[in-house]
Image (spheres, rainbow, N blue to C red):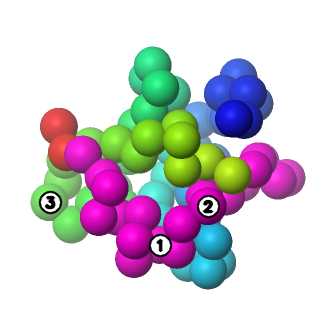
Amino acid sequence: MVDSSQIKEHADVIGADGVHVGTVDHVQGDRLKLTKKDSGDQRHHFISMGLVADIEDGTVRLSANADVAVTFEEAE
């Protein structure tokens, strides 16, 4: 698992396929809280830290493709 302290606010979250999934609002427990601006429903969405494969140049890269990763999102 990746060290969550390396994840910075406003970092891009990219699927394994290179597609933008969202922007980090902050790390909350074992989940990434994404900003509302990338959400179609103007709600915060969360992605499990278990899907984070790497942090590269400040970008969070997921182990799942974007279309799959969004199916794992939780809304608040």
Q: Dividing the image into 4 quarters, which one contains the C terminus?
A: top left
**The quadrant where residue 31 appears:** top left
The relative height of residue 76 versus residue 29 in the rendered view (above or below) is below
Q: Are marks 1 and 3 in contact (CB under 8 Å)?
A: no
Residue annotated with mark 2: 63
Disc 1 marks a residue whose amino acid type is Ala
Residue annotated with mark 1: 66
Asked if residue 57 is among those painted magenta in the image, a careful observer would answer yes
Query: Residue at 53% across / 38% down in the picture?
Result: 49
Precedes in sequence: disc 1 or disc 3: 3
- The x, y position of residue 72, in whole percent, is 32, 56
Precedes in sequence: disc 2 or disc 3: 3
Q: Closer to the camera: disc 1 or disc 2? A: 2
The relative height of residue 60 versus residue 30 in the rendered view (above or below) is below
Q: Dot 3: few (<14), some (14–19), or many (≥20) neighbours within 10 Å?
A: few
Distance (Cα) linking label 1 and label 2: 9 Å
Q: Are marks 1 and 2 in contact (CB under 8 Å)?
A: no
Disc 3 marks a residue whose amino acid type is Asp
The disc at residue 37 is none
Disc 2 marks a residue whose amino acid type is Ser
The span shown in magenta is 54-74
- The x, y position of residue 23, in whole percent, is 50, 52
- The x, y position of residue 11, in whole percent, is 63, 48
Asked if residue 59 is among those painted magenta in the image, a careful observer would answer yes
Q: Closer to the camera: disc 1 or disc 3? A: 1
Tell me the SS state at disc 2: loop
User: In this rendering, would 31 be left or right of 70?
Assistant: right
